[in-house]
Amino acid sequence: MVRKYGREPYRVVVVHGGPGALGDVAAIARNLSSSVGVLEPIQSKYTVDGLIKELKEQVETYTNEPLFFVGHSWGAWLALLFAVRYPGKVKQLILVGCAPFEEEYVSLISERRKKKLSEEEGTYWDLLVGKLERGYNRDDVLMELERLVVKSDHYRFRETEEDKRDILPVDGKMYSSVWREAEKIRKDGRWKNLLSRVRCPVYVIHGEMDPHPLEGVIEPLFRANIKFRKIVLPRCGHSPFKEEEVCESFYDLLKSIVL
């Protein structure tokens, strides 16, 4: 499934996070579509390799030209993996709220999140994560975690009625199966080799208040000799398009890159 915005030719692909956060980046596609044609692929496979291949099929249905890929969170990783395998398909990568590429930074994510949660919420967070790892009703657990993420990962969260309509049911099975595999890429240190094979320019857009450590993204990019530009958004958390104070300036920034 691919949702289309604006007119052809399509020049931008927005890649949602999660894994399994279906429809989560629709707001980006809608806002860019006043200026450029945008594709929003909805992920449906349950392996990393399957998602990379699916993304290629989804994009090639509409164009064979190299495109701008805007990936959010897990979607930033997927866009990078896609660029490594199919370099001729990617004109430029825009990584929004990207997770760190190295294991040493992972513990900081939980620490920073819990600083924004109450003690009771932090305990509940650990309980939910444990349930997720043990395979409890994943869709319900992810929905509960998302309620806490609104507080832990954002500065001033906003969600319009249109945003709510665009969101599809979360896919807990996809999250568990794909993220388990993706985490292993990081634990095994495989990003070092993968990043060395990226050939296109990269933008890194990161919220100042994002619990995901920015240094865990830019330092590996620097060591891989990737040409990248870093942009830190003040008063902003993990998802700039869901932030009351910066969403409009975020969209203006994206348009300045892709137009």
Image (cartoon, rainbow, N blue to C red):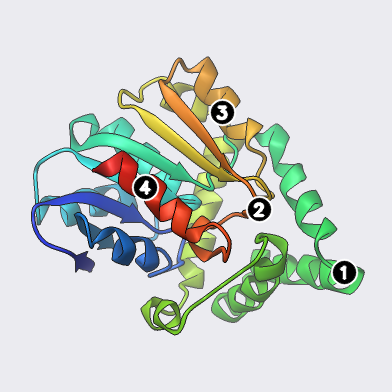
On the question of residue 48 being in view, the answer is no
Tag 1: amino acid = Ser
* Numbered tag placed on residue 235 in the rendering: 2
Kind of element beneath mark 2? loop
Residue at (35, 67) in percent of width and height: 26
Q: Earlier in the sequence, mark 2 or mark 3?
A: 3
Mark 4 vs mark 1: which is more N-terminal? 1
Neighbourhood count class around disc 4 (C-alpha, 10 Å): few under 14, some 14–19, many 20 upward: some
At x 11%, y 61%, the residue is: 7
Q: Quadrant of the C terminus?
A: top left
For the point 34% across and 27% down, the residue is: 201
| Amino acid of disc 2 | Arg
Looking at the image, residue 58 sits to the left or right of residue 72; the answer is left
Answer few, some or many: residues within 10 Å of disc 3's Cα (few below 14, many 20 plus, some between 14 and 19): some
Q: Is residue 33 visible?
A: yes
Give residue 18's mark.
none
Residue beneath label 4, please?
254
The quarter of the picture where residue 80 lies is: top left
Separation of marks 2 and 3 at Cα, in angstroms: 20 Å
Give the mark nearer the N terminus: 1 vs 2: 1
* Disc with the residue nearer the chain's start (2 vs 4): 2
Which residue has dot 1 on it? 118
Instruction: Tell me the residue that label 3 is attached to.
Output: 218
Q: Secondary structure at mark 4?
A: helix
Badge 1 crowding class, 10 Å Cα cut-off, few under 14, some 14 to 19, many 20 or more, is few
